[in-house]
Image (cartoon, helix red, strand yellow):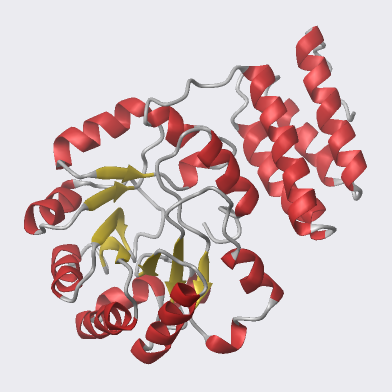
Amino acid sequence: MAGVTDVPFRQLAWQFGVGHVVGEMVSARGDLWDTTKSRLRRTSVAGITPVAVQIAGADPRTIAAAALRHWQDGAQIIDINFGCPAKKVCRKAAGSALLADPDLVARIVRAAVAAVAVPVTVKIRSGYSPARRNGVEIARIAEAEGASAVTVHGRTRACRFLGQAEHDTVASIKAALTIPVFANGDISDAATAADILAATRVDGIMIGRAALGAPWLPGQIAGVTAEPDQIEKLQIMFSHVDAMHQFYGEPGVRIARKHVLWYLQKLAGFGTADQRRLLARSFNRLDEPAAQLAFLQELVQRCVTGDSRFGEAA
């Protein structure tokens, strides 16, 4: 979710009642601390507590130094990513690639816990591969080395995001640990969340990709907020894009495009899927913040008036 759960997104999710948010994954490398990307990803959101940051790396000393620096910068929870399956992360032997080396996982968690006086949590997968589903072993190691909580995605590193997430391993991890365990993977509505909570007895649910284009979803699953209607969703999309322009400046125009696509993909009933794809293409041709906002404002007005010209550029 790096590049997605940024300040504007987290602000919206918090507004709609999510119970906890974690910042975008950032590299533990000290030489990247002052880059624009790292600075923006480290930005906390006023009023949201605890401040949780997520770091990735493969060297215990580097992880410890990064954890210390984040803590000194105001982080109240340090989350270590052992779950990301992205090739660019795994090529550096970080993220879910570390599941193949339980000893290194132990040394990383141990180093981070020793470096800070705030909770250290970890995000893992159910294992390295279907043939090596070692999530229980990894989770036990994390707990033994001082981790305060574990979040488990119900796929292995080798599975990436293919196939269906399985939560039997999540249930086994919950049964094996005394610290809180959170389930993640293919949880897209309240009914699914309730089923997984009952089946695994985990302490909570983490939402990732299901919230793309639906920042209200975690709060909705938690029972805090109702699902917005079509007009409200369009208005949320407008506010989200406006916030991205303000937060990023000129790059916000480009970043907004993927979010608008995700919103439109989930606006079932607002034209056909093909018509919504045409709208996304029209939006992608816009290069100015004002033009993007005008486009989205016209979509709101079309929905209000019942205008059916969904496939036309605004």
Give the percent coordinates (x, y) of residue 74: 49, 68
At a point 26% along the width and 79% down the height, the residue shown is: 105
Q: Nearer the viewer, residue 40 or 276?
A: 40
Q: Give the number of marks.
A: 0
Residue 102, x across and y down, in percent: 21, 79
Of residues 300 and 116, the one drawn nearer to the viewer in this rendering: 116
The answer to whether residue 229 is above or below residue 49 is above
Residue 2, position in %: x, y? 55, 61
Q: Is 48 on the left or on the right of 7, as rendered?
A: left
Toward the left, the furthest residue is 176
Left/right of residue 297 with respect to residue 50 in the rendered view: right
Asked if residue 304 lies left or right of residue 231, the reply is right
Above or below — where is 258 with respect to 219?
A: below
Residue 57 makes an appearance in the image: no
Answer with the quarter of the image where residue 286 lies. top right
- Residue at (11% x, 53% y) in the render: 172
Q: In this rendering, does residue 136 appear at all?
A: yes
**Viewer-proximal residue among 43 and 230:** 43
236 is higher (above) or lower (below) than 228? below
Residue at position x 90%, y 28% in the image: 314
Residue 149 percent location from the top left of the image: 25, 59
User: Residue 57's quadrant in the figure?
Assistant: bottom left
Task: Give above or below for 172 relative to 40.
Answer: above
